[in-house]
Image (cartoon, helix red, strand yellow):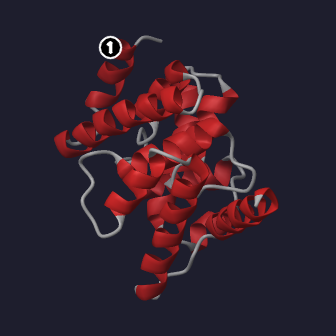
């Protein structure tokens, strides 16, 4: 699927603000893929569709989680996590994208997971550092992304976990496990 067609599909499914964010994620993902020997075309498509379900009704997302036997753990955590796995499902069923690597990058772009693929890391990080994001710690992660993808992803997860802890919010287990996986694998290389 070409860029223009993909962007046309998502444009009516989100706000103007979210569409601008998506364009930023797309450009950032392509840049990261080129920097780290990933597949820029897969990064582009995954980035364009990463928030495909972002504005779906919560009841619809909950129903899909239940009907598709997704992790029931999702239902006990913040609804902000739901759009990623639901989005991957809807991108497959509504848009017709079958590439598992692209679908998994969409599925795990909010939570991460252990043994993330290169594309999953790229989409996770691109969503976090795209140029329209402005929050404490993002500049540090942007700088890290220029030199070491794993360190940047690890720092983004650390920032997210600390943010949730400060707000007394639960941390989705996949995120915690993903962070630990990156830390433990990083130590093996040292």
- Residue 41 position, x and y percent, is 51, 19
- Residue 43 position, x and y percent, is 51, 29
The C terminus, quarter of image: bottom right
Residue, disc 1 = 4
Residue 172 vs residue 25, the one in the foreground:
25
Q: Residue furthest right?
A: 188
* Residue 3 lies in quadrant: top left
Residue 65 vs residue 149, the one in the foreground:
149
Q: Is residue 57 visible?
A: no
Q: Residue at x 46, y 48 (%)?
A: 145
Q: Secondary structure at mark 1?
A: helix
Residue 164 vs residue 98, the one in the foreground:
164
Lateral position of residue 86 relative to residue 9, left or right = right
Lateral position of residue 165 relative to residue 167, left or right = right
Residue 83 lies, with reference to residue 46, above or below; the image says: below
Residue 121 lies, with reference to residue 133, above or below; the image says: above
Q: Residue furthest left?
A: 16
Q: Residue at x 68, y 56 (%)?
A: 113
Q: Is residue 52 visible?
A: yes
- Residue 105 position, x and y percent, is 59, 39
Residue 125 lies, with reference to residue 158, above or below; the image says: above
Residue 84 vs residue 75, the one in the foreground:
84
Q: Residue furthest front?
A: 190
């Amino acid at each position: 699927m070409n860029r223009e067609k993909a962007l046309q599909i998502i444009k009516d499914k989100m706000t103007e603000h979210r569409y601008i964010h998506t364009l930023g994620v797309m450009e950032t993902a392509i840049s990261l893929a080129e920097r780290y020997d990933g597949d820029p075309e897969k990064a582009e498509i995954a980035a364009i569709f990463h928030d495909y379900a972002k504005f779906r009704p919560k009841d619809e997302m909950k129903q899909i989680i239940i009907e598709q036997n997704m992790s029931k753990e999702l239902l006990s955590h913040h609804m902000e996590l739901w759009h990623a796995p639901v989005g991957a499902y809807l991108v497959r069923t509504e848009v017709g994208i079958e590439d598992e690597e692209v679908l998994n990058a969409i599925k795990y772009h909010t939570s991460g997971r252990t043994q993330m693929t290169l594309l999953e890391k790229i989409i996770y990080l691109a969503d976090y550092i795209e140029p329209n994001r402005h929050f404490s710690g993002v500049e540090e992660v942007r700088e890290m992304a220029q030199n070491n993808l794993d360190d940047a992803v690890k720092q983004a997860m650390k920032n997210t976990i600390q943010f949730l802890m400060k707000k007394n919010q639960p941390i989705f287990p996949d995120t915690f496990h993903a962070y630990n996986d990156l830390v433990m694998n990083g130590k093996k290389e040292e």
